Amino acid sequence: MNNKVKGFTLIELIVVIIILGILAAVALPRFTNLQRDARIAKLNAARGSVAASAALLHATVLARANIADITACPGGGTANNSNAATGTVCTENGLVNLVNAYPDVTAIGTTAGILSAAGLTTAFNPTLVQLRADGYNYTSTGNVATFQIQGAPTIGSCQFTYTEAAANGAPTISAAVTTGC
């Protein structure tokens, strides 16, 4: 009669546990870095969207040459397409306010400006709740808007700013600060 019990020895189990521990110690920091990389990529994508939308709306205003639209925009209002100090332009989602022929900085929930033009959320003129649900934070002070990524360890160091265009100038979009992402 063969009374051999089949199974793993204690030493084999300890070796497997040690190998799994080493793998976890190596893989976990890399996973954390992927989250940081994802936040940086999201921040750079938002910055690119802001820059592209500002340029596109500026080109639209120049092409329309101060000639007001004759039909209302989706959501109401008629664009004057003015390249003066203030103006409006009609987009497929609604009316966007301009300063010196570029999107303006507006507070959340008021009129549409660079935040709405950039299309970071599915809502045209998003509320702070909608914006945060999509992983962004937005604040505006005077003529400067700050875009931040939610979930960053240091949210104030994972951002970029958009400053309204001055007369005869373009808006300033700062470099992305990623030290806190």
Image (tube, helix red, strand yellow):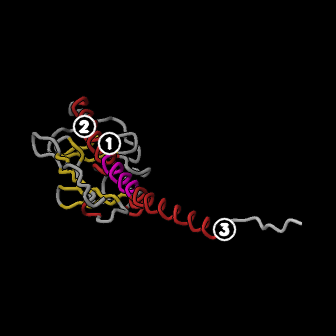
Percent across and percent down for residue 9 are 66, 68
Query: Where are the magenta residues, as a range?
Result: 33-44
Number of residues whose C-alpha sits closer than 10 Å to that of mark 2, classed few (under 14), some (14–19) or many (20 or more): some
Query: Extreme bottom residue here?
Result: 10
Is 81 in front, or is 98?
98
**In the figure, is residue 4 to the left or right of 110?**
right
What amino acid does circle 1 point to? Answer: Thr
**In the figure, is residue 82 to the left or right of 70?**
left
Percent across and percent down for residue 83 are 18, 38
Foreground disc of the pair 1, 2: 2
CA gap between label 1 and label 2 equals 21 Å
Q: Secondary structure at mark 3?
A: loop
Sequence-earlier tag: 3 or 2: 3
What amino acid does circle 2 point to? Answer: Ala
Q: Secondary structure at mark 2?
A: helix
Numbered badge on residue 9: 3
Which quadrant of the view contains residue 135? Answer: bottom left
Q: Which residue is mark 1?
A: 78
Identify the residue at image location x=56%, y=64%. Answer: 15
CA gap between label 3 and label 2 equals 68 Å
Identify the residue at image location x=17%, y=55%. Answer: 143
Q: Secondary structure at mark 1?
A: loop
